[in-house]
Image (cartoon, rainbow, N blue to C red):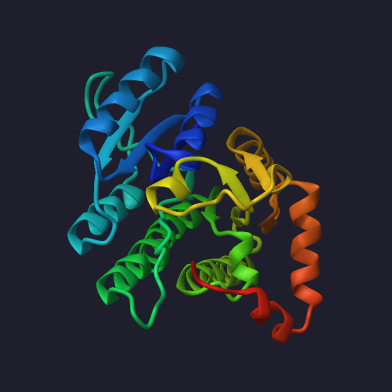
Amino acid sequence: MGTALVTGATAGLGLEFVWQLATARHDVVLVARDADRLEEVARQVRAAAGVHVEMLPADLADPDDLERVAARLRAVGDGDGPDAPRPRPVGLLVNNAGFATAQPFVRGDLDVELRALDVMVRAVVVLSHAAAGQMTARGRGAILNVASVAALTAGGSYAAAKAYVRSFTEGLAVELKDTGVTATVVCPGFVHTEFHDRAGLDMGQIPELGWLEAPEVVAEALADVRRGAVISTPSVRYKAASALLRVLPRSAVRAVGKYR
């Protein structure tokens, strides 16, 4: 048992991470923008899993909100009682928050692009730094960053953000070697969540074989964290797709990379 902090905790993979961690008897810190939805998820998790649940309403694109989350990751303590705030050290950080930009870059809204970088790149760096400092001081912990198989493609700014997360996590894993702290990046393919609907993307052209289920993706990612893997690619078919993308000429990868 320990404490896990999950960003983007009220929907999609983030919500699945929360449930699997809570049912494994981990206390959880939920981070998301929608305070009402946070309250509802926290209520359900407390009732069903009986673990301690903290809520941190935060917009990770807002520097002040991001700093509040980073401060929670740096906090270490045991609290003063069952009803007091318990700044127990976070033993697992799950950097999951993200969204699809769903627009062409040149004719798109630049503010959307910058917000995407803030949430999917800047926040990952800031929170990983905060967590790694606290964890290495204690000699134990894990950081799990959510990227995508898209990181190996030429699929626009979303793919570029996820490529940064993948490369960043690999470098972090090297730096953390022999510290007792690990860094893992999970790179799923298409997953049945509300992610694409929220972005207004029509995914009807993707065959059912191309889809993964959130519980299986999260279970494999957490298993890879436990064994100290650096790169986690759920499912045999996406492992094969990733291997192919790594060996194809980049001209061939660019030929199939396109915006919506």
The foreground one among 115 and 168 is 115
Q: Position of residue 108 (x, y in %)?
A: 33, 75
Hey, which quadrant is residue 128 in on the image? bottom left
x 80%, y 49%: residue: 236
- Left or right: residue 203 versus residue 117 is right
Q: Position of residue 195 (x, y in %)?
A: 45, 47
Does residue 1 appear in the picture of this structure?
no
- Left or right: residue 29 versus residue 80 is right
Q: Position of residue 111 (x, y in %)?
A: 25, 72
The foreground one among 134 and 110 is 110
Is residue 244 placed above or below 84 in the rendered structure? below
Is residue 103 placed above or below 48 in the rendered structure? below
x 64%, y 45%: residue: 221
Is residue 3 placed above or below 124 in the rendered structure? above
Q: Position of residue 18 (x, y in %)?
A: 46, 33
x 27%, y 61%: residue: 61
